[in-house]
Amino acid sequence: PLYEEALQYKPGDVYANGRINEIDQLLALQEKQKQYNDLIAQADNNYKSKNYDQAISFYNQAIQIVPKDQYPKNQIALINAERLLQAKTEQIETDFNFAIQSANTQTQQKDYLQALNSYKRALELKPDSKLATDKITETELAIVAVETDKKYLQAIQLADQAMAGNDIQKAKMQYLEALKIKSGETYPKNKLD
C-alpha cells in the first residue's frame, strides 16, 4: 500500500513500480506454495489411508505446481512399489492355497508322492507355513506306512508261497521278516507256532 500511495504522488516511479511487482510476485509465490502444501497434505493423507489412486492424483497436481520437487515423484514411485508388492503377495497367497488344495485332494486319492510334492511347493511359497510343514510330515509318515505295508505283505506272500511249496525253512525266514517289519501282527506269529 505504501508504494501504491507513492505512485499517486509520483506516477511512473520506477523504484515504486519495481517494489510493487516484487511484492506481487512474492504473494503469487506464497499462494503457489500454499496450494502445493495443501495438495501434498491431501496426497499424504490418502496415501496413509491406502487410497492410492487419489494420492497419486494429488501428487501429480502438486508436480504441476512445483515440477522440480522430488517428494511427490518419490511418493508415486513408493505407491507403485507397494502396489507391486501387494499384487505379488496376493499371487503367492493364491498359489499357496491352490497347492494346499491340490495336495489335500491328492492325499484323499492316496497319491501321497504327488501330495508331498504339492505340499513342498506350498512350503516354497510360504517358508514359514506351519500348515505346509505339518502336512509334509503327515504325508511322509503316510508314505512310510504304505511302504511298510507293501514290505510286510510281500514278506507274507513269499512266506505263504514257500509254505505252500513245503519249503518250511524259507517260509519261517519270511514270516520272521514280516514280524520284523510289523511286530504287532498276529498272522506271522500264528504261522510260526
Image (tube, rainbow, N blue to C red):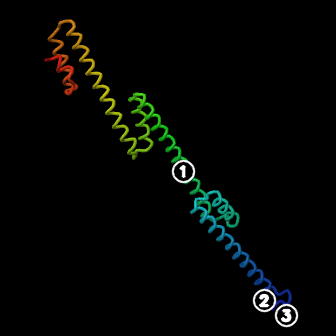
Circle 2 Cα neighbour tier, 10 Å, few/some/many (<14 / 14–19 / ≥20): some
Quarter assignment of residue 2: bottom right
Residue nearest the observer in this picture, 126 or 138: 138
Q: What number is the disc on residue 86?
A: 1
Earlier residue among tags 1 and 2: 2
Position of residue 73 relative to residue 107, above or below, is: below
Q: Measuring from the top left, give residue 12's x and y in whole percent.
A: 85, 86
Quarter assignment of residue 125: top left
Earlier residue among tags 1 and 3: 3
Left or right: 21 with respect to 193? Answer: right
Which residue is the site of mark 2? 3
Q: Quadrant of the N terminus?
A: bottom right
Numbered disc total: 3
Callout 1: helix, strand or loop? helix
Circle 3 Cα neighbour tier, 10 Å, few/some/many (<14 / 14–19 / ≥20): few
Callout 3: helix, strand or loop? helix
Residue nearest the observer in this picture, 34 or 23: 34
Q: CA distance from mark 3 to mark 2?
A: 10 Å
Which residue is the site of mark 3? 9
Quarter assignment of residue 24: bottom right
Question: Outermost residue toward the top?
Answer: 165
Foreground: disc 1 or disc 3: 1
Disc 1 residue type? Gln
Position of residue 10 relative to residue 127, above or below, is: below
